[in-house]
Amino acid sequence: MRSQEENVRGAATIPVAHSPPRDARRVTPVALVRLSVRACGQPTHPSRETWQHGGVTAATHSTLFPQVPDSADAVLDGLDPEQREVATALRGPVCVLAGAGTGKTRAITHRIAYGVRAGILQPSSVLAVTFTNRAAGEMRGRLRQLGAAGVQARTFHSAALRQLQYFWPKAIGGSLPRLVDRKIQLVADAAAACRIRLDRGELRDAAAEIEWSKVTQTVPADYALAAAKAGREAPRDPAEIAQLYAAYEDLKRARSVIDFEDVLLLTVAVLQDRQDVADQVRAQYQHFVVDEYQDVSPLQQRLLELWLGDRDDLCVVGDASQTIYSFTGATPDHLLDFRVRHPGATVVKLVRDYRSTPQVVHLANGLLGQARGRAADHRLELVSQRAAGPEPVYAEYADEPAEAEGAARRIRELIDSGVPAAEIAVLFRTNSQSETYEQALADAGVPYQLRGAERFFDRPEVRKAVSALRAAARFGGNDSLLDDVVDLPSQVRAVLSGEGWTTEPPAGSGAVRERWESLAALVGLAQDFAAARAGATLSDLVVELDERAGAQHAPTVQGVTLASLHSAKGLEWDVVFLVGVAEGMMPITYAKTDEQIEEERRLLYVGVTRARERLHLSWALARSPGGRPSRRPSRFLKGLRPGSGTAGGRAAAGGTGGVERGFRGGGGGTEAAVPRRTRRTPARCRVCGRTLTDAGEMKLMRCEGCPSDMDEGVYERLREWRAVQAGRSGQPAFCVFTDKTLMAIAESVPEDERELARIPGVGARKLNRYGADVLAICAGQEGVGLDEDD
């Protein structure tokens, strides 16, 4: 699970600038790129003489210290046609559908940098938001390298916290309540107050349910219904969770504290209630970029809407096929419905995969080819831009320890053959699988690092080493260690030798080895810095380290990465070992519904697309040595691994890359470039005329606050009828029709099937099943569908 605490911690002390930016000039989008298409439906590559490929996105595979482009046009150098479309589409709403490895971060950072360098965007007027501190730090680092320093790149939580701290005294009065680091203790205290006994695992699960409820804007009284509607399996009786949730909120108020979800909720409340505050924020930020848009929760979407106001200078980037956080409230619907909310949007599809070999890409496409559901209908067919590599390797083992030993043995061979340890990863479904691989790697003498551990520049040995380098830069003339060294790398090695760095790593693993790896990463960084900046001094390096610490742009630490599939999102390695790819683990046992199964498939897809060159997939037939070999390979590999039959895949609906223009009026033939099915009129309130974005309001076709002309008698008869239908089918009432749909019916009182079918929430299936009853009730007929003996 993404750590919301990690994403906001440390942001509290940074002030907010509020000087309104100068008016930004508009830029006309460049002409539509038309790609010739082969018979197989994949685009022909433009000549490599006219554009350089987008490059892989890992910091380890790019120049660590590139020269800042000398002009705005130079920022565009090296972008492929679709990436260039993203970078130059600076007007109005833009939606970038970016497959794995297609250079989305490159495209959006060059977009911001191009706008800034061309004078179209003021740095202080741009807010780029993403979901992890690491991603935000990488974005800030790239923007700095492109000459666009000063742009705000933050997580949703840290951006909201900055605004909340600044405006709280003005909007509420006094100081902001204390932000609690972790909610587990509060949940435990709330459970005790409710006399509910929870073990440690249940406490963690209950805290997750509270987080989900808050980001989906569900109050305690509505929890049970909302959880059932979302198909969530509550860790305890839903009524108990609702009681616990209510007690938790009461306890927070009594102690005058807030949690991380409150940061978003309170910011939303202030922006909604105080027009003067909203105006000030909108004067500050006029251009928005949202990365990983498929992971936006309803609460984050609401905050984004309030930041935007009635403007549309918004660029969103995402891939529905990488939606793997729905358990936290994330939904790809905002990404998939972007063209509905913004009919004039420019949509750019990135499908050129620069990360992975054709063999890896073929497996990734094959996985999604078997997928079902809405996200699968919008998947992108990746086209590898790399030379051919080895086929994925599949391995079966007798038990889990044997699987771990096999992986460690192969990793040892790869390292001995020259593959850097930092370019190898072992990815698993749950963190509980880590220990077996830690032991196997240690036994094989392979260094490793655990993903999700303390951030690099926060490590004690790194802080101490940077302090030592700073002192040496100031007073190096009095340090005997530096008497006989003149070049920068030698100076750094001399200083860090006093902190425990040696030319050879210590034997074994553990804390001593981890400290050495941290210091070795600083030594390597100094060598790269000196090579890129002729004549660089120790003081220059300290400045670079301080800037990197501020951006959380860490150097590479040598060691095999051990990580869960969720925490590996956004990362990549030359070699990836996907372990435990067996039924019960992939998909996980508790994935029951079709939606949950499809999310597990997407999680495996994310794991596959982390690999650049080599991919190993393995599973064990038993958990322990001597155990019954009852396990079987994951169903997701059927038809993809040798000897497993034929897969029933489908072609991707949006497989090729390219651009779709939105219709913004003004002639010029733009309308013809938009597929007819995407040109929809925005939903507007039938009372006040405001554009509607909330799903519930769109069903009613009016704002929640606008007066209703609902026929109360029809509404009550519909509710009675719905209760009977739900009882007959043994399902919750909302599965028949939601309250909002019943309200919409009672407000419009349709007279025929055509009018009824226009109401959102009344699809063809429900029209066929319930249409006659609903129309009869609207016509005033009594007792419709209420006779339980018929």
Image: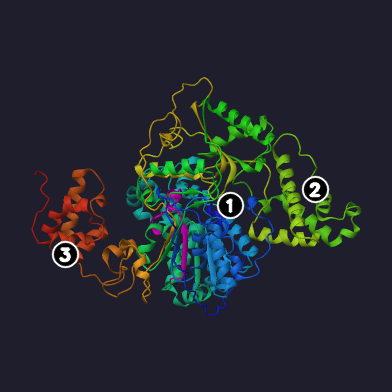
Upstream in the sequence, badge 3 or badge 2?
Answer: 2
Residue tagged 1: 56
Determine the secondary structure under disc 2: loop
Separation of residues labelled 1 and 3 (CA atoms): 57 Å
Separation of residues labelled 3 and 2 (CA atoms): 78 Å
Q: Quadrant of the C terminus?
A: top left
Callout 2 amino acid? Glu
Q: Is residue 232 left or right of residue 352?
A: left
Residue segment shown in magenta? 312-334
User: Which residue sits at x=38%, y=36%?
Assistant: 647
> Looking at the image, is mark 1 or mark 3 nearer the viewer?
1
Q: Position of residue 1 (x, y in %)?
A: 50, 47
Upstream in the sequence, badge 1 or badge 2?
Answer: 1
Quadrant in the picture for residue 613:
top right
Separation of residues labelled 1 and 2 (CA atoms): 34 Å
Label 2: how many residues lie within 10 Å, few (<14), some (14-19) or many (20+)? some
Residue tagged 2: 499
Callout 1 amino acid? Val
Residue tagged 3: 749
**Residue 175 seen in the figure:** no
User: Which residue sits at x=40%, y=47%?
Assistant: 40
The residue closer to the viewer here, 297 or 294, is 294
Q: Is residue 385 left or right of residue 526?
A: left
